[in-house]
């Protein structure tokens, strides 16, 4: 079965309107990007695009640090909420499809792609488009869930992401979570293949080893048994880790037609 677009996602996920949790994610993004770019002040001259911006909470936070922030989403109500709630000269929200972006090549220093790849019909085309609109040496903040995950993160149903689609759809119906499981997660190796045209700066282990520096102590404590277990798991069972944070860098020597080559290669 071909995966369809997930319209009106925010109406099904009240967490998209949770300011505290969304801003926590944004703080982590700033910490990672500042580490890559050599400090928060250096972000002030950069232009950022957020694909899958939803209700705009994350983008409003990011706009405090970047020269210009643009958020796009196909969710009409979420974009309307974002546009009416957050009014800044350096912040704009657009209802647009991340698989067919109208931006010219080499437009952005940073692209945010956080928990998005599994929601789109064609993740290879999404990554190809991100590659196209990034400037040479620009980076994509890529936060991606692993298909091999005991607890599915969107619906909190054990083993859901690992099931074949027909069984996952039935599971959703029986659990009263909906009629169809849209998300298509990839394994660690699938994610590596998906992003192979970028240079990958893997921040995952660095973050779990230094949770305070990357504003993730609400998830991984710097002390205690739970935090230590997470660090051991990340070190020895990395391909089974539930979520990855990678900065995907567009290499300056890539030929101009690489995006088209990528898209063809993934078919």
Image: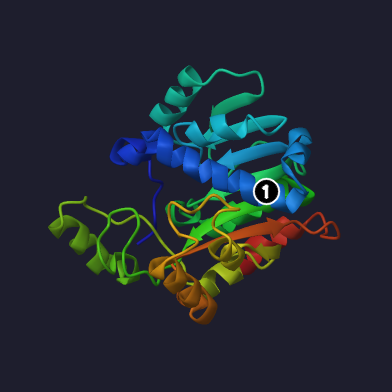
Is residue 53 visible to us here?
A: yes
Q: Residue at x 39, y 27 (%)?
A: 77
Residue 65 vs residue 199, the one in the foreground: 65
- Residue placed under numbered mark 1 in the picture: 33
For the view shown, which residue lies furthest in the right direction?
253
Residue 143 lies left or right of residue 2; in this view the side is right
Up/down of 245 relative to 116, above or below: below
Q: Which residue lies furthest to the bottom in this view?
A: 236
Q: Residues within 10 Å of mark 1 (few under 14, many from 20)?
A: many
On the question of residue 198 being in view, the answer is no
Quadrant of the image for the N terminus? Answer: bottom left
Q: Tell me where residue 29 appears, x and y as whole percent.
A: 59, 47
Image: 205 above or below 153: below
x, y percentage for residue 153?
A: 35, 57
Left or right: where 183 falls relative to 39: left
Say which quarter of the image contains residue 149.
bottom left
Q: Where is residue 17 in the image (x, y as percent from the top left)?
A: 37, 33
At x 51%, y 37%, the residue is 53
Q: In which image quadrant can residue 192 be found?
A: bottom right
Pick the quarter of the image with the C terminus: bottom right
State the image coordinates of residue 41 (x, y, percent, origin top left).
Answer: 76, 37
Outermost residue, front side: 223
Q: How many marks?
A: 1
Is 1 in front, or is 38? 38
- For the point 67% across and 33% down, the residue is 65
Residue located at (30% from left, 57% from top): 181
């Amino acid at each position: 079965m071909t995966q369809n677009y997930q319209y009106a996602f925010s109406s099904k996920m009240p967490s998209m309107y949770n300011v505290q949790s969304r801003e926590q994610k944004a703080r982590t993004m700033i910490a990672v990007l500042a580490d890559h770019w050599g400090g928060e002040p250096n972000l002030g001259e950069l232009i950022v695009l957020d694909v899958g911006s939803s209700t705009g909470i994350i983008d409003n936070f990011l706009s405090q640090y970047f020269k210009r922030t643009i958020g796009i989403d196909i969710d009409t109500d979420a974009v309307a909420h974002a546009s009416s709630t957050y009014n800044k000269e350096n912040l704009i929200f657009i209802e647009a499809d991340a698989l067919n972006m109208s931006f010219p090549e080499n437009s952005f220093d940073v692209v945010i792609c956080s928990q998005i790849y599994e929601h789109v019909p064609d993740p290879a085309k999404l990554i190809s488009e991100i590659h196209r609109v990034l400037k040479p040496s620009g980076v994509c903040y890529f936060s991606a869930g692993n298909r091999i995950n005991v607890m599915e993160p969107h619906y909190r149903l054990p083993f859901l992401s690992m099931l074949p689609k027909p069984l996952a759809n039935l599971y959703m119906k029986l659990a009263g979570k909906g009629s169809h499981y849209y998300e298509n997660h990839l394994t660690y190796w699938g994610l590596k293949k998906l992003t192979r045209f970028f240079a990958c700066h893997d921040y995952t282990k660095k973050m779990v080893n230094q949770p305070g520096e990357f504003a993730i102590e609400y998830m991984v404590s710097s002390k205690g048994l739970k935090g230590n277990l997470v660090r051991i798991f990340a070190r020895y069972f990395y391909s089974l880790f539930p979520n990855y944070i990678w900065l995907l860098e567009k290499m300056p020597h890539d030929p101009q037609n690489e995006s088209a080559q990528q898209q063809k290669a993934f078919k």
